[in-house]
Image (tube, rainbow, N blue to C red):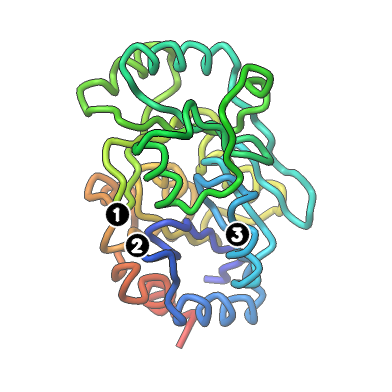
Amino acid sequence: MNYKILFLDIDGTILKPDHTYSPSTKEAIVQVQQQGILVFLCTGRPLHEVNDLAHDLGIDAYIGYNGAYAAYQDKPLVNEPMKQHTLESFLLLASKHHHELVCYTSEKNYFTTLFNSITKDFAEVFQLKQNERLSDHVLDQILGASIMNVSPDQIKLYEAMEEGIHLSKVNVEGVENCYDIIRKQVNKGEAVKGVLEHLQIKKEQAIAFGDGMNDKEMLQAVGEGFIMENGDPNLLPFAKHQTTSVQNSGIFNGLKQLGLVK
C-alpha cells in the first residue's frame, strides 16, 4: 500500500506517563517523513500547549481539541467552537454536583477554579501552563472541554442534556474520573475525514495510533488503525491492529508491522 498520511495521538501514544517520548518514536517519524508520508498530531489537547513537542518532533500539521480545530501549512481546515448554550448548561450541572471544568480556547485554558487539588492535579499531569479562571466573555470561543471529578454513574447526567454529545474517559496515568466532552459531528474522526478530503488522500492510505476512547472515531476513519498495548480495552474493537505500549516503542513497532520503518 502507498501510505500517505499518519495521525498520532499524544498522551499515552507519543508521550509516556513521565511526559517524555521514546527516541524510537522520533526515529519512526523521521523515517516515514523521509518516505513522503505526512504526519499530523491528533490530540484532545489545546494546540497552544503542544507547540514545543511539535517542534521537537518536526511536525507542523495538527488536529487539536478532539477534532474541533485542524491546521495544515498554517491554514485552518477545521474550526468548530462548541455551542455556548451547551457549555452554560454543563457549567450549571457541574456546579450543582461539585465537578470542575477546563475549557480550551485557541490561546488559553480556562478552569472553573484554579485553586483546588482536582484542577491543580489535572493541570500538572497535562503540564498546562496558559491557565486562567473561566469567565463568561470567552464562552463563545471554546473549542473543547474536559470535566473533572465525575463518578461513572454521573456521566449520563451530561449525556442526557443534549443529543449528539458523549463523555469520553481520559486514559492517562494519574488522572481519575475525568472525561472529555466529545461531539458526534466534531471529533478526531470527523477532522481526519476532513483532512483526507482536503488533501485528496484515500482512507486506505491513512494510518493512526491512539490509546483512549476519544480516538475511537479516528481509528475508524483510517485504513490502518492501531491501539497501543496500554490503551483502553474498550477501544480494541475499533482498531485494526494492536501494537506495544507507549513505554515499549509502540509507534515504531506498529509502523514496523506495516514495513515502514526498520
Going by the image, does 236 lie left or right of 92? left
Foreground: disc 1 or disc 3: 1
> Residue 28's x, y, as percent?
50, 78
Q: Which residue is mark 3?
A: 40
Q: What's the residue type where badge 3 is placed? A: Phe
Image point (42%, 71%), residue name:
251
The quadrant in which residue 130 appears is: top right
State the residue position of label 1: 173
Query: In the shown orientation, is residue 137 left or right of residue 43?
Result: right
| Sequence order check, earlier mark of 1 and 3 | 3
Return the x and y of residue 153 as percentages of the image width and height. Answer: 20, 22
Which residue is pictured at 47% across the width and 11% down the height?
Answer: 89
Give coordinates of residue 66: x percent, y percent.
52, 41
- Element under label 3? strand
At mark 1, the secondary structure is: loop
Looking at the picture, which amino acid does disc 1 mark?
A: Glu
Structural distance between the alpha carbons of marks 1 and 3: 24 Å
Q: Quadrant of the C terminus?
A: bottom left
Labelled disc at residue 98: none
Label number found at residue 17: 2
- Of all residues, the one furthest to the front in this rendering is 115
| Image coordinates for residue 60, horizontal then vertical, percent | 69, 62
Q: Are marks 3 and 2 in contact (CB under 8 Å)?
A: no
Quadrant assignment, res 244: bottom left
Are the two marked residues, 2 and 1, in contact with CB atoms closer than 8 angstroms? yes
